[in-house]
Amino acid sequence: MYPRPKSHPLRGLVTTVILGIILGLAVVAYAYWNAATQANPAAPAALSSTPTIPGVTAIPGPEPIKLLVPTANIDTPIVEIYLSGTSWDVSGLGMNAGHLHGTAWIEAPGNIVLAGHVEMGDGQRGVFARLTDVQINDSVFLYQGTARRRYVVTRVQTVAPEDLSVLYPTESDRLTLITCLSYDFVQDAYQERLVVIADRVR
């Protein structure tokens, strides 16, 4: 049975705000990191410009893209989470996995970062509720129509909310899944982030 803490009336709102703030800090850290690497010709390409349409939208393309993690019983569409000011707007994420705009995408090598809720505002299980079940060597898949990209989990770790290193770009094909962990009733906030890192298998 999935253990779920008792819902607090403001918990969903607070969780969404906290996740937005953390992701906003990631934008700032990423920008500093990216600026520092521009002097290096071998550094990864710069972030694309921030679109004018904030919020959550379907990813454009000929076929819908979805995430499949058999171990965690995850089979969900992937939507684009756009930057709104200095943070990603996750308020409309719902039961989807959200691609953090500005991180890599399937058209080029790099670190694709997908975020998902561990719990919804009404206390129901989120799309990443069972991400804790994932173990080293488990398979993770991205599907675009009938095309499949397979990744193998190489690391499962917890990080502090302010640790943004897991969002940094990579030169290799990597998929990073991130969600909240360790809810604190007193502070009404999640104290850690669960991170699953998988590398592509060709």
Image (spheres, rainbow, N blue to C red):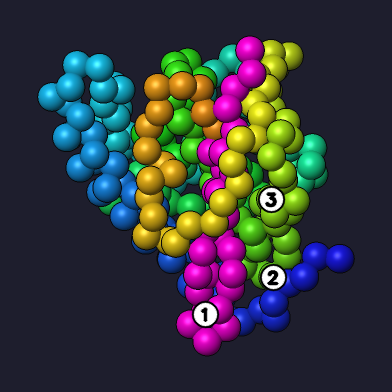
Q: CA distance from mark 3 to mark 2?
A: 17 Å
Q: Is residue 187 above or below residue 15?
A: below
Give the labeled residue for mark 2: 123
Amino acid at the residue labelled 3: Leu
Q: Is residue 155 above or below residue 92?
A: above
The residue segment tinted magenta is: 176-202
Dot 3, how many residues are within 10 Å of its Cα: few (below 14), some (14-19), or many (20+)? many
Q: CA distance from mark 1 to mark 3?
A: 21 Å
Q: Identify the mark at residue 174; answer none if there is no mark.
A: none
| Residue 201 sits inside the magenta stretch | yes
Give the labeled residue for mark 1: 188
Question: Which label sits in the foreground, 1 or 3?
Answer: 3
Mark 2 lies on a secondary structure that is: loop
Give the labeled residue for mark 3: 131
Q: Is residue 85 above or below residue 141?
A: below
Measuring from the top left, give residue 4's x and y in whole percent: 73, 72
Amino acid at the residue labelled 1: Asp
Mark 1 lies on a secondary structure that is: loop
